[in-house]
Amino acid sequence: MHKSIINLNEIKKKINLKNKNKDLEPLIVAVSKTFGIEDIMPLIEFGHIHFGENKVQEALDKWENIKHEKRNLKLHLIGKLQSNKVKHALKIFDYIHSLDSLKLAQKISEEQKKIERKIKLFIQINIGNEPQKNGIRIDELENFYKACCNNFDLEIIGLMCLPPLNENPVKYFDKMKKLSKDLSLKHLSMGMSSDYMSAIDYDASFLRIGSKIFGERSK
Ligand SMILES: *Cc1c(COP(=O)(O)O)cnc(C)c1O
């Protein structure tokens, strides 16, 4: 069996052991950025459906053909999206986890009207209030969310965060859970290779896991 399948099964087993009393199983987005389709293919053949990429062009190059063949595959954009790439992003992605500005919200709204399809969106939160990070500030979130729903008719399914590096993420996951509850949102995209087990304690429903599945990235 391919290493990525063994790794994914181990992750699922760990989650199930911990999650015995919860009825909702978190969905695993296998983050395949930098890996070639030959590394990804075994997981696709195994039946895994959700994959994550952080660059629009890389995703188009890698996924356009295979998504055409396998219609059930779902692709998640987890990296920064520039407004001028929205049109291309909508061609290949089913979910965008990185909605982080009104300008981007407006552009997505315009482009998705043209193709008569609503993409599923997460609002990215700058949960540690870090100057170098993307994301909506906590104090802006309520207004931003209202604008997304009322002015732009977007389908916001949840919130996403990347907690500050080299810190225990737990207090940030806890904050995310509260923010999500305040807005009655259904989903939380949080938890990566190093911290997915604590993310599920705070009701993460979309885990974005790369290196624990595919191995270390070379670049
Ligand atoms: C790369 C990346 C991940 C996955 O990271 P790993 O540590 O390899 O699991 C998750 N989320 C985002 C936004 C990423 O860019």
Image (tube, rainbow, N blue to C red):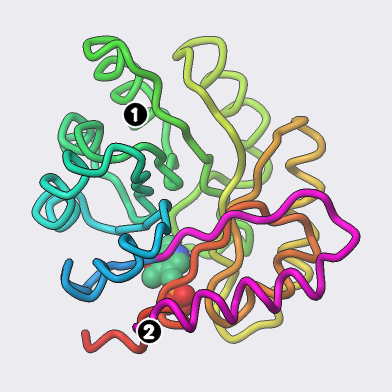
State whether residue 132 appears in this view: no
Three-letter residue code for mark 2: Met
Q: What residue is drawn where x is 23% and y is 75%?
A: 39
Q: What residue is drawn where x is 30% and y is 58%?
A: 53
> Is residue 214 shown left or right of residue 65?
right
Crowdedness near tag 1: few (<14), some (14–19) or many (≥20) residues, C-alpha within 10 Å = few
* Residue to which mark 2 is pinned: 1
Front: mark 1 or 2: 2
Q: Nearer the viewer, residue 162 or 65?
A: 65
Number of the label disc, if any, that sits on residue 186 = none
Residue 117 within the segment the image draws in magenta:
no
> Is residue 85 shown left or right of residue 199?
left
Task: Give the quarter the ligand 1 occupies.
Answer: bottom left
Furthest residue toward right: 21
Between the C-alphas of marks 1 and 2, the distance is 45 Å
Where is 175 relative to 154, above or below? below
Where is 92 relative to 188, above or below? above
Q: How many numbered tags mark residues here? A: 2
- Secondary structure under tag 1 reads helix
* Residue to which mark 1 is pinned: 103
Residue 11 within the segment the image draws in magenta:
yes
Three-letter residue code for mark 1: Lys
Q: Quadrant of residue 2?
A: bottom left
Q: Position of residue 73 (x, y in %)?
A: 34, 45
Magenta residues?
1-30
Q: Quadrant of residue 141?
A: top right
> Is residue 198 shown left or right of residue 88?
right
